Amino acid sequence: MEIDKFSNYPFLTRTVQYVADMGTPVDNILTSRSFDITRYRARSRVLQAIHGDIQHDDTVNFTVELLSYAVARIMVSCLNDAFLTRRYSLAEAKYAYHMMKQENNEVLQEIGEDLHIVASVTESGLFYLHFTDYIRGAVRLRSIQWKLVNRILNSGYVSITKEEYARLLQEAVRSRIIDALPLNVPDEFCQALEKYLLEIKASVDISRTEFDEAGFGNVESEHFPPCIVHLISNAQGGINLAHSARFALTSFLLNIGMSVDQVVSLFNVSPDFNEEKTRYQVEHISGSTGTAYKPPSCTTLITYGNCYGKDKLCETIRHPLNYYKRKKKTGSAK
């Protein structure tokens, strides 16, 4: 890989070493006026991540783009907010995916080797990788197409398209970034970035409340059971929910009065969000085909590992809808 591509993939081992070899003191990057543009670009990366996708900036040079990733990670670490960390990691991974789709096969293979998802390329242009590498990349991808049982195995190897390989690498990038955060950042570094951190924190707070204020409509979200609160937090944090969790969340929200559009919008930050497919699934659960589905009982939620944070009220009910109704009536968990 040519050095000029390093700024597109700042999470790679070679890139990290390249930045270290530059020898630029971190405190200079965080305080010197000569690095104002770098800090501003880092701020933009984080703010854009909160609201969706990181955009390429043609106005900044190679060094600014490269160092802005390091500064952005420091900013995220200073705030140490789980919601922000998930959003940021996902956005950086999606940004890398956009770049990787445009690379030639050799560059993509080099990235894969660094991320421990090694592949060779067949004469037909397919990427050929061992099933263990495939599973490592696809383990958190919930769509049925990624299940190993739906792939053809040939002597322990799986063939996938270039775009699918890039998607596996995207998930590996997300995991690498989120697993390394938060960094152990000295207090003086965070103090130097205070004006940026205040702006980012305000944006996080707004993003958190946007769905509550607009997305839930007349539904009283403060009365949701802990399991639903947890699933909403994950969905809004860009985490792919398992099928059972997605069904539980969707059916619950539909049954308490949310519209199909409102529920679909909840999932629009998921890594594999497809509006047409999501809308079809939500409409199906809502009863468009004749059968409206009820959310699973507490026993079923426990069976599938979707019961989280039980409180005292949970101990007295057997269904999440009963929790919501009782808490609306009493106004508090008992």
Image (cartoon, rainbow, N blue to C red):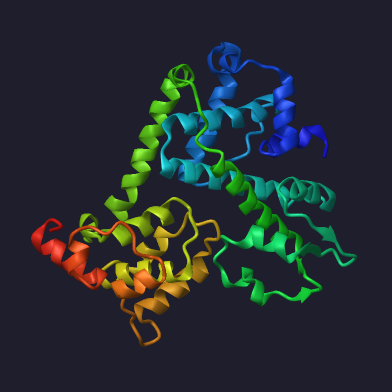
Figure check: 158 above or below 9: below
**Viewer can see residue 12:** yes
Identify the residue shown where x is 72% and y is 49%. 100
Figure check: 151 above or below 5: below
Identify the residue shown where x is 70% and y is 24%. 20
Q: Seen in the image, is 66 located left or right of residue 181?
A: right
Identify the residue shown where x is 66% and y is 71%. 148
Q: Dividing the picture into quarters, in which one does residue 299 lie?
A: bottom left
Residue furthest to the right in view is 123
* Rendered location of residue 173, percent (x, y): 63, 47
**Viewer can see residue 256:** no
Identify the residue shown where x is 46% and y is 42%. 50
Quarter of the image with the N terminus is top right
* Rendered location of residue 276, percent (x, y): 51, 69
Q: Seen in the image, is 329 located left or right of residue 274?
A: left
* Rendered location of residue 86, percent (x, y): 48, 46
Count the marks: how many? 0
Quarter of the image with the C terminus is bottom left
Residue furthest to the left in view is 330
In front: 81, or 72?
A: 81
Q: Dividing the picture into quarters, in which one does residue 249 lie?
A: bottom left
Residue furthest to the bottom in view is 290
